[in-house]
Each structure stands twice: as C-alpha cells, then as structure tokens.
Image (cartoon, rainbow, N blue to C red):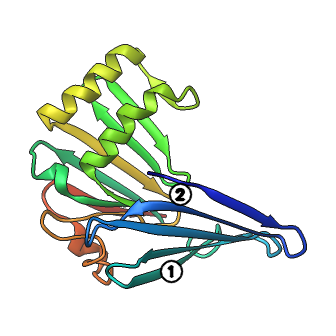
Amino acid sequence: MIENISQENSLSNIVTSSTSTICHNCNQEANLKYVTIKEVKPEITVVVFECQICKIKESKIFNDKINNIKLKIECKFNSSEDMKREVFLNLGAKLFIEYDTYTYEHESSLPFVTTVEGLITNAIKAFSDENNHFVGNKTNLNKSLEILQNMKSFTLIIEDNDGVSRVGKIGRGIYEMQDCDIEEFNDEKVKHIFIN
C-alpha cells in the first residue's frame, strides 16, 4: 500500500510529504518522509527513511549543487541471482532497461531502494502511464519486459547527476554497503563510472 500525504506551509515555503515503503532489512512496512525547503536556493529536500520494527532512522539531503559528480552505472545481467541485487535509485536519476532493440526509460521522482526485479516489475506496471517515454513498439516492449522477468538477460543503465545511485553486489544489501568505496560495488557485471 502506497499512501502519499502532502502539505505546504506557505509562511516558510516548506513542503512535507510521506509515503509508505518496504524496509529491505526486515521486509515490513516502513516510511519515507520528504521535507522540501523552497525558501533557500537551490531548494533542498531532506529524505528520512524510518522503520519502526528495525528502529532504523536515516536521513539524506538532496539538492542540485551538493554534488556535481555525474555517475553512470552499466550492468549486464543474465541470471536469477542478478534479479536479487539491491538498487538505490536517487531522486532524478535516469534508468534505462535495454533488451534486444527495445529500451525502457524512467526518471526517478523520489529516491528509493528496491531490487533489480522490483525495477522491472515497476517498468511493466508503468506501461499504463502515458507520461513515460518508450522507444520502439509499446506492445512489443511490454512483451519483451515480461520476457525479461523469465530470461534474465538484459542491460541496465543508470545515469545520476548527483553520483549517489548504486547497484549492490549479490548477497549484500545497499544499507550494508552504504559506507563502502564505489569500487567495492563493481564486479564483472556491474560498473560504476564517474563522469566529468
């Protein structure tokens, strides 16, 4: 169940919202809270992840000027184990799922952690959203993405202008690796590349 609650304080130009999500530590319901401060330029968004069961409370600050190191993540996946890798997709990061001659493209409207399988499931659900951009025939792309769930052979690319998105290793969660150097995320199928 996803619930969005949003309110704006016109006196101080602060917008708050929250949404429910799944905690990847305990697989129970958790909350993401967003506080956007529009009074400062560039505007700042604070994202708070909170799980009452695990007693985890983490905060991240996002704005256009904090980090201008661009990151490109290139992944070539072909096994069911790859589908279990955790992914942190940053606010504003662009996601591309390429299969054969088809490409699915998505820009993240909020930061979140999911699995590769979760990204593909969300992509398939997004076909009902006319605001998404599709390259190729929509019917064929839908069929191809459904095939991806079974075949497990595709290319995943993430472009993040803030440089904070990550694709984790098999068997290691994103939160477990949050203090790791960027090189520790790389393996034979995943490459995190900083771009000037």
User: Looking at the picture, does residue 175 appear above or below residue 96?
Assistant: below
Residue 89 in sight here: no
User: Looking at the picture, does residue 11 appear above or below residue 189?
Assistant: below
Give, as a three-letter code, the residue at label 1: Ser
Say which residue label 2 marks.
Answer: 110
Q: Residues within 10 Å of mark 1 (few under 14, many from 20)?
A: few
Q: Residues within 10 Å of mark 2 (few under 14, many from 20)?
A: few
Residue 66 figure quarter: bottom right
Work out whether mark 1 precedes mark 2 in sequence or the reverse, and give the earlier one: 1
Q: CA distance from mark 1 to mark 2?
A: 14 Å
Say which residue label 1 marks.
Answer: 59
What is the x, y in percent for residue 119? 33, 46
Identify which residue is drawn at 24% across, 65% down.
168
Total marks placed: 2
Q: Secondary structure at mark 1?
A: strand
- In the image, 182: left or right of 189? right
- In the image, 132: left or right of 105? right
Identify which residue is drawn at 47% across, 68% down.
31
Is the residue under label 2 in contact with that under label 1 (CB below 8 Å)?
no
What is the x, y in percent for residue 160? 47, 58
Instruction: Residue lying at the far right in this picture: please name it.
Output: 11
User: Looking at the picture, does residue 193 appear above or below residue 145?
Assistant: below
Residue 192 figure quarter: bottom left
What is the x, y in percent for residue 81? 10, 52
Identify which residue is drawn at 44% across, 23% down.
135
User: Looking at the picture, does residue 73 appear above or below residue 30?
Assistant: above
What is the x, y in percent for residue 111? 49, 61
Identify which residue is drawn at 25% across, 78% down.
176
Give, as a three-letter code, the residue at label 2: Leu
